[in-house]
């Protein structure tokens, strides 16, 4: 299981990246992250919503109420222009951290 | 006998008691809870097990309340009320100038050059209001809120004092017809309103920067 701090720090870039593929809703976002990480990246479900609301207040994402195929009401979130900018910055920063770590790991085996 | 609907009602009450009162978050959480219960029941869990498991995964009401409260804090942080007030005042001023300009052009006789100068002012106002978001990009990002406020207030004061000096000491030295006077006043008001709007522009630039990097 991944550490709590890392899970929290990765929430925003993951949400932004998922929404870049198209609009989605809270439950589907959680399921998608869970599936892509083989269940290793697990959020406390309820905690996703304050994060989504904060991101909406910051103008990174927008929301609309809609209905699912089964008729259940859902709040769909999608990316805004500022969200795309924020996502690019996140990718840049996480890639940097990853490349530094990978470089250090490589040196250990040389 | 376990009653799923009654259990959800009780769960809602707990959330409300903890202070999650805004309809939107609670409704969203309940939809999530129902999705999770449905999924768990489809995979073979009993209604009671599915409910208990899903409620546990949603998390404790007090912890959720704390997290939702941070959303409000964030809003206050990014949208300082005073800067918004200044911005809306500037937009109102621009609107008033436009109405005054149209009225003057219909009422007073003036040469083509003066009329064009007046139209240019109104076009500049319209373009700056409509292209406000684009114009905001020209403002530098000042991360320190105190510095931003000082710069904003300085521009605001400069705008007001400039107007007082212009109206009382500069304008009386020229002999202008009513039409010409209107055009000059329109341009001076526009420049003053633009100076006043600097604060809002600085706040918007900072907000965008913080929003995309925080």
Image (cartoon, coloured by chain):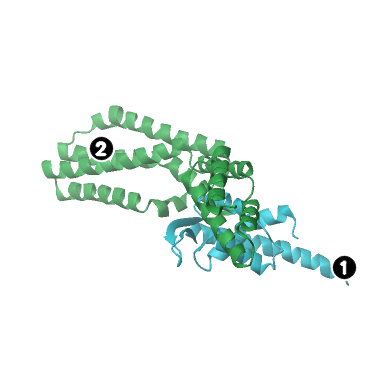
Chain colours: A cyan, B green
Density class for disc 1 (Cα within 10 Å; few <14, some 14-19, many ≥20) is: few
**In the image, residue B145 lies at what x, y percent?**
55, 39
Residue receiving disc 2:
B185
Q: Chain of mark 2?
A: B
- Please say if the residues under marks 1 and 2 sit with CB atoms less than 8 Å apart: no
**Left or right, B166 with reference to B18:** left
The residue at 35%/37% (across/down) is: B89
The numbered disc on residue A108 is: 1
State the image coordinates of residue B5 (x, y, percent, origin top left).
Answer: 52, 52
Where residue B67 sits, quadrant-wise, is top right
Q: Position of residue B108 (x, y in %)?
A: 12, 41
Residue plotted at (69% across, 61% down): A41
- Which percent across, then down, holds residue B7? 57, 49
Secondary structure beneath dot 2 equals helix
Indicate whether B99 appears above or below A40.
above
The residue lying toward the viewer, choosing from A95 and B14, is: B14
Residue at 69% x, 56% y is A7
Q: Which residue occupies the foreground of this view, B12 or A103?
A: B12
Determine the residue positioned at 68% across, 67% down.
Answer: A37
Does residue B106 appear in this view?
Answer: yes
Tag 1, which chain?
Answer: A
């Amino acid at each position: 299981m991944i550490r709590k701090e890392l899970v929290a720090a990765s929430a925003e870039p993951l949400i932004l990246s998922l929404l870049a593929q198209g609009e989605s809703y809270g439950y589907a976002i959680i399921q998608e992250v869970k599936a892509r990480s083989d269940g290793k990246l697990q959020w406390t479900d309820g905690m996703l919503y304050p994060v989504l609301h904060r991101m909406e207040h910051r103008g990174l994402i927008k929301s609309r109420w809609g209905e699912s195929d089964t008729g259940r009401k859902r709040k769909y979130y999608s990316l805004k222009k500022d969200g795309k900018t924020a996502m690019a910055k996140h990718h840049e920063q996480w890639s940097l951290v990853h490349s530094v770590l990978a470089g250090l790991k490589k040196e250990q085996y040389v | 006998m376990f009653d799923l609907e009654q259990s959800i009602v009780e769960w809602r009450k707990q959330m409300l008691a903890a202070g999650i009162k805004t309809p939107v978050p609670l409704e969203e959480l309940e939809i999530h809870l129902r999705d999770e219960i449905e999924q768990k029941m489809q995979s073979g869990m009993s209604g009671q097990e599915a409910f208990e498991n899903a409620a546990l995964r949603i998390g404790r009401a007090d912890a959720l309340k704390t997290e939702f409260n941070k959303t409000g804090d964030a809003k206050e942080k990014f949208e300082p009320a005073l800067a918004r007030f200044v911005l809306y005042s500037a937009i109102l001023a621009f609107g008033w100038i436009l109405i005054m300009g149209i009225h003057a052009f219909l009422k007073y006789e003036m040469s083509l050059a003066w009329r064009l100068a007046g139209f240019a002012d109104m076009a500049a106002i319209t373009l700056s209001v409509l292209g406000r978001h684009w114009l905001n990009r020209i403002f530098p990002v000042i991360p320190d809120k105190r510095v931003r406020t000082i710069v904003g207030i300085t521009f605001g004061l400069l705008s007001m004092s400039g107007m007082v000096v212009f109206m009382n000491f500069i304008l009386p030295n020229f002999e202008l017809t009513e039409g010409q006077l209107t055009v000059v006043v329109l341009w001076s008001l526009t420049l003053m309103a633009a100076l006043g709007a600097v604060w809002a522009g600085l706040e918007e630039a900072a907000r965008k920067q913080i929003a995309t990097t925080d």
